[in-house]
């Protein structure tokens, strides 16, 4: 079953911000008071929202915008059932009290908001929350394809296996093969699902749909780069077009040289900086999906290029000017020739875009020491490291500009699609780190703000250290166009690699996680994967002695 990642941003009335903060605090306190020895913390959510992996409610305050309430959720299945369970579990009266502290939206959900927040209203809240949902622009899942129930069930089985081995000394005299058989006979009645085939984590259809999406995105991107050259060739003819391409490339190259040249792409490592990390473990994985995406991109590029003139021809025909329009075959031949010439046009276009990027980067104003609210910092520290996992929520402003908007949207889309296809990401790795359960970025307010939410293992400091050392390139692409971010170099260089400045930037943009729920708070990403492998081998009724010995080493 596929996991869903989403958030619901709600603008808060400034005069109601303190009231809303108190309501969220009271919600957390009341759910905390229901602790159960069997289910752990927040048993009402464990029972009432059986699909939820993580759930949080945070409020962001900033001098540049009114307070913003964000509900973030990571769950199995579709949003509809989740929101119904969410409303029933949290309580519609509590949710109405929260929503009455928020502003009426100015989009198509305004009528729903009024019906939900009216005095004495009994209208369901779930449709309004679903209507306000924002899907991620980029996301990562550490244990992709494992449902919440499967993660908890496998953890229970592994705990039972370990307890049986610890308490029964008879196993010490057995061979590995006999240990496996005896344990399975002993525990199978308590875990009847062992005899059922394991659900496939990523279905074949989902797998190849991800490949198709990445290929279509790459094809559209290539077509966009080829289109200016193709149109210019069609307008000027080959000789003049070639001369213009050479001239534009020379001018753009001189411009880049004037903005610091190309040295940033091969700049040496800073003194004292750690060496580049080793490969993430992707070696040996099947890269057929990457090759398939490349094939789709190559096949899709001419299709995207042909759509524009074909659409124009259809419009002219419908307008009664069809006799002046050449046939589609002629159009396709002309576009095909122009597209081949358009490859030459990519050179000045790419250099020109590079010049604009460097022009903006060299004139950015990063914030080396962003102001930190001591009270907020103290509350964040107080709420961290209570369990194995932690939660981070950050909201930042995006720098203005058409190019920045296009770059950050394309960068996020490409990053999101790549993380669903790249072998290491599919195995739970970001770079060479595996500490992230769910993480996502989402654009708010027409790309003027960017929210980042992450559920991760271990402390916040070690989490950011991992990112800085092992995945700073991806972070710089995702966050590099935000206000105050450490100065970038050629879009993906530097930026998050400057650990001190990036930590200050991330900390200043954080909100206090006043309400945060985890369905399995003491399990790390690595431990969940280890449990899955142990259980997968335990499903087999028999193992050979070497196979059983290898299985025992996992315990």
Image: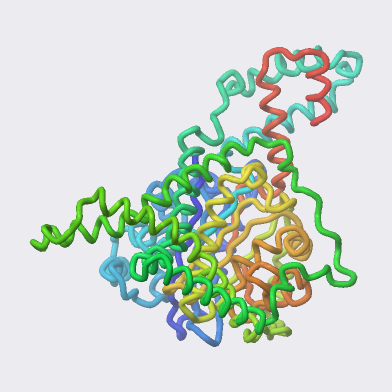
Q: Residue furthest left?
A: 320
Point out the image quarter for the C terminus.
top right
Q: Quadrant of residue 192?
A: top right
The spot of residue 29 in percent (x, y) is 59, 63
Left-right relation of 206 to 418 = left
| Residue 492 shows in this picture | yes
* Rendered residue at 78%/13% (across/down): 544
Q: Is residue 329 above or below residue 382?
A: above
The spot of residue 358 in percent (x, y) is 62, 78
Q: Residue furthest front?
A: 239
The spot of residue 303 in percent (x, y) is 36, 50
| Residue 134 shows in this picture | no
Q: Quadrant of residue 554?
A: top right
The spot of residue 514 in percent (x, y) is 60, 67
Residue in front for this viewpoint, 468 or 457? 468
* Rendered residue at 54%/80% (across/down): 399
Q: Quadrant of residue 63?
A: bottom right
Q: Is residue 446 above or below residue 553?
A: below
Left-right relation of 118 to 485 = left
How many marks can you see?
0
Residue in front for this viewpoint, 65 or 518? 65
* Rendered residue at 67%/50% (across/down): 521
User: Which colouring convention does the figure follow?
Assistant: rainbow
* Rendered residue at 68%/56% (across/down): 456
């Amino acid at each position: 079953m596929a996991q869903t990642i989403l958030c619901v941003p709600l603008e808060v009335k400034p005069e109601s911000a303190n009231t809303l903060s108190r309501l969220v605090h009271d919600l957390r306190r009341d759910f905390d008071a229901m602790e159960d020895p069997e289910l752990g913390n927040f048993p009402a959510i464990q029972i009432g929202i059986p699909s939820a992996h993580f759930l949080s409610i945070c409020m962001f305050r900033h001098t540049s915008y009114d307070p913003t309430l964000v509900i973030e959720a990571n769950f199995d299945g579709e949003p509809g059932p989740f929101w119904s369970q969410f409303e029933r579990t949290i309580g519609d009266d509590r949710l109405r009290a929260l929503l009455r502290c928020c502003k009426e939206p100015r989009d198509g959900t305004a009528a729903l908001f009024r019906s939900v927040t009216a005095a004495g209203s009994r209208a369901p809240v779930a449709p309004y929350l679903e209507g306000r949902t924002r899907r991620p622009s980029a996301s990562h899942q550490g244990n992709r394809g494992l449902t919440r129930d499967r993660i908890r069930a496998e953890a229970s089985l592994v705990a039972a296996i370990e307890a049986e081995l610890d308490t029964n000394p008879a196993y010490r005299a057995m061979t590995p093969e006999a240990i496996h058989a005896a344990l399975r006979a002993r525990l199978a009645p308590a875990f009847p699902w062992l005899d059922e085939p394991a659900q496939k984590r990523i279905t074949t259809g989902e797998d190849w749909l991800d490949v198709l999406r990445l290929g279509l995105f790459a094809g559209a991107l290539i077509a966009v780069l080829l289109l200016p050259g193709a149109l210019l060739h069609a307008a000027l003819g080959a000789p003049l077009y070639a001369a213009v391409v050479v001239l534009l490339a020379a001018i753009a190259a001189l411009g880049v040289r004037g903005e610091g040249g190309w040295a940033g792409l091969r700049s040496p490592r800073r003194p004292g900086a750690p060496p580049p990390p080793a490969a993430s473990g992707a070696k040996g994985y099947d890269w057929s999906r990457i090759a398939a995406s490349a094939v789709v991109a190559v096949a899709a590029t001419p299709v995207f290029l042909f759509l524009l003139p074909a659409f124009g021809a259809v419009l002219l025909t419908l307008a009664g000017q069809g006799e002046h329009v050449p046939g589609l075959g002629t159009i396709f031949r002309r576009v095909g020739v122009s597209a081949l010439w358009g490859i030459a046009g990519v050179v000045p276009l790419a250099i020109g875009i590079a010049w604009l990027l460097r022009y903006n980067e060299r004139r950015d104003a990063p914030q080396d020491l962003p102001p930190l609210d001591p009270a907020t910092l103290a509350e964040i520290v107080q709420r961290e490291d209570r369990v194995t996992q932690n939660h981070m929520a950050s909201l930042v402003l995006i720098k203005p500009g058409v190019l920045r908007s296009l770059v950050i949207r394309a960068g996020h889309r490409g990053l999101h699609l790549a993380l669903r296809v790249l072998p290491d990401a599919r195995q739970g790795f970001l770079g060479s780190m595996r500490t992230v359960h769910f993480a996502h970025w989402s654009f708010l307010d027409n790309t003027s703000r960017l929210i980042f939410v992450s559920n991760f293992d271990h402390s916040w400091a070690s989490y950011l250290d991992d990112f800085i050392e092992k995945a700073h390139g991806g972070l710089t692409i995702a966050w590099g166009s935000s206000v105050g971010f450490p100065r970038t170099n050629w879009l993906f260089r530097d930026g998050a690699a400057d650990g001190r400045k990036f930590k200050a930037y991330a900390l200043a943009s954080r909100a206090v996680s006043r309400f945060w729920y985890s369905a399995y708070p003491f399990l790390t990403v690595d431990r969940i994967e280890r449990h899955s492998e142990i259980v997968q081998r335990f499903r087999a009724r028999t193992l050979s002695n070497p196979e059983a010995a290898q299985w025992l080493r996992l315990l």
